[in-house]
Amino acid sequence: MSKVLSIKMISFCCLASACFSLNVQAQTPATSFKFDFGDGQPAKGYTAVGANTAFTDATGYGFDFGAKVNSVTRDAKKGVVGSYITSDKPFNFSVDVPEGNYKVTLTLGDIKGTSLTTVRAESRRLMLEKVATQSGETKKVSFIVNIRKPQISTGGEVRRNPREMGKYDWDDKLTLEFNDSQPCIDAVEIEKVDDQITVYLAGNSTVVDQDDEPWCAWGQMIPRFFKPGVAIADHAESGLTLGSFIGSHRLDKVMSLIKPGDYLFIEFGHNDQKEKGPNDGAWKSYTERFKTFINAARDKKAIPVIVTSTSRRMFNDSGKVVNTLGDYPAAARKVGQEMNVPVIDINAMTAKFYEALGDEPSKKAFVWYPAGTFPGQKDELHDNTHFNSYGAYEIAKCIIEGIRQNHLGLEKFLVDTPPFDPSHPDPVDQFSLPSSAKWSVVKPLGN
């Protein structure tokens, strides 16, 4: 081989290698972003996001789902705090990201005014509640958002029901909802983090991230009470039982992701009690399937936690809550005792919560609304199983109290969580969260 030919071959190989490297780099999705909100020149190292920056597949970021926003510039020389995006209606911002946990850091505030901001993520997970800044003040606040995809690394994918197909929880984006009376968003930073303790939630409609107002569940409220260090991955879905959670490959999905030191919170019962096969029942299939979940978590060196089912709203003539769940709460407690698994007895705590409110007032924790409360709502909504934001928020506080009572390692990551007694709940007339834009009068699956 001639020397010239040899040099040409080496040059070709180097060029091919460089092209391959660039191609791989181009195909590797970004997992770190810094966005400067507001029209004008962005701060150094940040990407500009103006009022007209709509999400597209090509850019992979922008305001989403028809958001209408305004840009306010206070001082172009002040970097990220010199301008902000705001709106008098809830607005969404999305970024295309791979599966995983992401630390989101927001810069909030107005250097010439006050602000008040509530933030939800994905399918209405509460992340920040009413963060206020005084005139001239800005704040940097962080939280963790879990992003999941239906595909399972070990093969196959989660079998979703038709009503899940449009859920933000299952799409390819990290979506943030900014809300409240005066949200002022100066900057958004997003970074993939692999060192978080992930709490996986397996359950039904009382746990799931409910997409639409006025429906809500404790699983979408609980992220608000954790600082970075813990990610909440809510894999619950309306209408599920222990068996259908397994059958739809959701347990496979969780087990493909869960790592040593993570947690698996398990709450089922409402729909399981309707299964009437010869091997069904609290002491048969329900008990055995609970053990399947527990053993699967332990095989991965994760920590299982049993959560008994939330009580339904049903009172007797003495003003006491009636147990409509038969032996299912007792069976869950027994599994916990036999297998040495922490138990959060939400069944008992929710009964105390409803009784503290009273029969008629306890409707205010559920989806009980007169006709005409929501646009196009012709009929009264009355539901004794599914919660509104107030009910879900109070039950999330019960879960937090159960974490404390069991001395779980998650305790050290709690924020804004003084001791909570469900017999003395927060006054409903003092509770306020701004509503999201999406609403529906269609009842979630299950009861």
Image: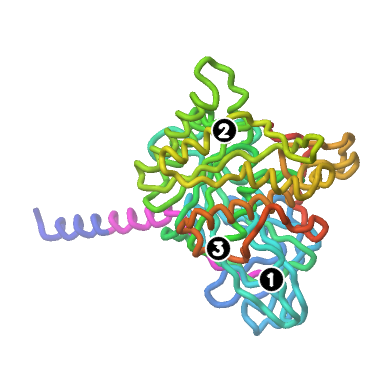
Is residue 16 one of those drawn in magenta? yes
Three-letter code, disc 3: Leu
Q: Is residue 112 left or right of residue 377?
A: left
Q: In which quadrant of the rendered view does residue 431 lie?
A: bottom right
Q: Is residue 140 above or below residue 1?
A: below
Three-letter code, disc 2: Arg
- Coordinates of residue 254 in the picture (x, y in percent): 46, 42
Camera-side mark, 3 or 2: 3
Kindly identify which residue carries mark 1. Answer: 38
Kindly identify which residue carries mark 3. Answer: 414
Residue 213: in sight, yes or no?
no
Kindly identify which residue carries mark 2. Answer: 160
- Coordinates of residue 142 in the picture (x, y in percent): 57, 67
- Coordinates of residue 49 in the picture (x, y in percent): 64, 66
Q: Which residues are magenta?
A: 15-37
Three-letter code, disc 1: Gly
- Coordinates of residue 1 in the picture (x, y in percent): 9, 53
Camera-side mark, 1 or 3: 3
Q: Residues within 10 Å of mark 3 (few under 14, many from 20)?
A: some
Depth check, front residue: 224 or 344: 344
Q: In which quadrant of the rendered view does residue 114 lie?
A: bottom right
Find the residue positioned furthest to the left.
1
| Disc 3 to disc 2: CB gap under 8 Å | no
Residue 16: in sight, yes or no?
yes
